[in-house]
Amino acid sequence: MSEEVAQPAPKQSKAKQQEQWKPSFQGQQEFTSHLFKLTDAKMLKKVVLGPNQESVQDATHNHFFHTQDSSGKHMNHSVATGGHFHIMTIEWDAVTGAPKATCSGPKQFIHNKKTNRKIISDMPVLGAHSETGEDIRDNHTHDVVYLQSSKGRPRVISAQAATFLDTTTPKPVVGIKG
């Protein structure tokens, strides 16, 4: 009986490693974007019936989510519908490699006047329940379905567009401050 001893893989030289590296050139970059649909779900919507008369109603809606926009930027939330969006989480199946997405509850952007930035916030209270006095909040989520994937290239500005933008940018006038 002879025992086989596993031989370590030969180490690659630095020259060999450099040959395997592939540079990325402007205009030739590609990215893959995956499209998901957040299926129909009911959200709560405040409806104004008249002066000092409001009602909270169910409204059916859905959203879409691209993992990357047309410029190749990674996206982390769905498209807004009905005044809100959802933060998305993507996981990849270890066996099949298929993407699976889940969504948070409804969120909205709020403008922070102190920092002059947009921040993500939960949806505000829609009112109080008429019988119990409890706050009415919309905490719905959606089932998420994979639709398709597509390859794209980041948008680049053409020389003609750059020239046009340069001519439309106001130039400072000598002697005038401001």
Image (tube, rainbow, N blue to C red):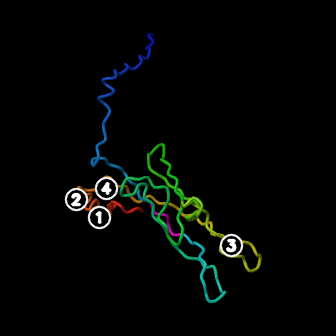
Task: Specify whether 28 is left or right of 122.
Answer: left
Task: Specify whether 136 is left or right of 116.
Answer: right
Q: CA distance from mark 3 to mark 4?
A: 44 Å
Amino acid type at image mark 3: Ile
Q: CA distance from mark 1 to mark 2?
A: 13 Å
**What is the secondary structure assignment of the residue under circle 4?**
loop
Residue 160 circle label:
2
Q: Main secondary structure of the magenta part?
A: strand
Classed neighbour count for the residue bearing mark 4: other residues with Cα under 10 Å, few (<14), some (14–19), many (≥20): few
* Circle nearer the N terminus (3, 4): 3
On the image, which quarter does residue 67 sit in?
A: bottom left
Task: Specify whether 14 is left or right of 46.
Answer: left
Q: Are marks 3 and 4 in contact (CB under 8 Å)?
A: no
Q: Which residue, given by chain and number where applicable, does mark 3 sit on?
A: 136
Q: Which residues are magenta?
A: 36-40
Amino acid type at image mark 2: Gln
Q: CA distance from mark 1 to mark 3?
A: 50 Å
Name the residue at the bottom extreme: 50
